[in-house]
Amino acid sequence: MQEGGGNQQANAEVGPTYSVSQISKLAYSYFGLVGSVTVRIAGAIRMLRQLLVSIAVSVCNIAIHAIVMAAVLWVARIASERVTSHRSFQLVAVMTATVSVLMVAHIAEVVVWTFAYAIVDVAPAGTDLIYFAFVNYTTLGYGDVTPVPRWRLLGPMTAMNGVLLFGWSTAVIFAVLRAVMTSQTEEGLREKGARLFD
């Protein structure tokens, strides 16, 4: 009998027992721990998912842009080496072709973002996704269409991709302009030199 009374006394010293859910509720109510940790983990997973999709689409667009840039520079170099009596026409033709090809490349990159938006269902039903992709890619940001909350990071990532690729295009336009102008200047100097020695 004394043993039984001893167990009651031991239990009384230990205190009341709580289930795991009761402890979780207590910790949340006192410290805000359990719920906020769960929310932070879920938020981190959502953000990681958005970043992975954005990075995959951005890498695809960078590859498209790199291929187009290499082709543009190659064609511009060949065109600038051709001797023509109409230097102004040559400059206009090369620059028009360069900018036109770059515009087509940017449109293709917007279409890639459009496909990504359609695959992950980034915008509300009935949204014109190509318009939404153009607004984000060009950083226009009208704000008339916003992504669904679980994909809201795709808009800024699209804008970042667009800014980087527009900057790259600008650098290539100036490289092509410089190559054509340098070629024309060298050609002009050769002609003047040839006339001097005739």
Image (cartoon, grey):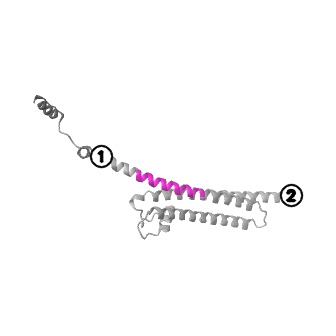
Which corner quadrant holds the C terminus? bottom right
**For the point 18% across and 34% down, which residue is it?**
14
Q: Any mark on residue 127, and which?
A: none
**For the point 38% across and 52% down, which residue is it?**
43
- Residue 137 horizontal/vertical position (percent): 51, 61
- Vertically, is 16 above or below 106? above
181 inside magenta stretch:
no
- Vertically, is 17 above or below 56? above
Q: Any mark on residue 196, and which?
A: 2
Q: In the image, is 67 to the left or to the right of 148?
A: right
Q: Nearer the viewer, mark 1 or mark 2?
A: 1
- Residue 140 horizontal/vertical position (percent): 48, 63
Q: Residue furthest right?
A: 198
**Disc 1 marks which residue?**
34
Residue 184 in view in this figure: no
Q: For numbered disc 1, what is the local secondary structure?
A: helix
Q: For numbered disc 2, what is the local secondary structure?
A: helix
Seen from the viewer's position, the closer of residues 158 and 19 is 19
Amino acid type of the residue that numbered disc 2 sits on in the rendered structure: Leu
Seen from the viewer's position, the closer of residues 31 and 87 is 31
**For the point 50% across and 56% down, which residue is it?**
160
Q: Quadrant of residue 112?
A: bottom right
What predominant SS class does the magenta segment belong to? helix
Q: Residue furthest left?
A: 1
Amino acid type of the residue that numbered disc 1 sits on in the rendered structure: Val
- Residue 82 horizontal/vertical position (percent): 77, 62
**For the point 40% across and 50% down, which residue is it?**
44
Crowdedness of circle 1 by 10 Å Cα count: few (<14), some, many (20+)? some
Give the extent of the magenta segment.
Answer: 45-63
Residue 129 in view in this figure: yes
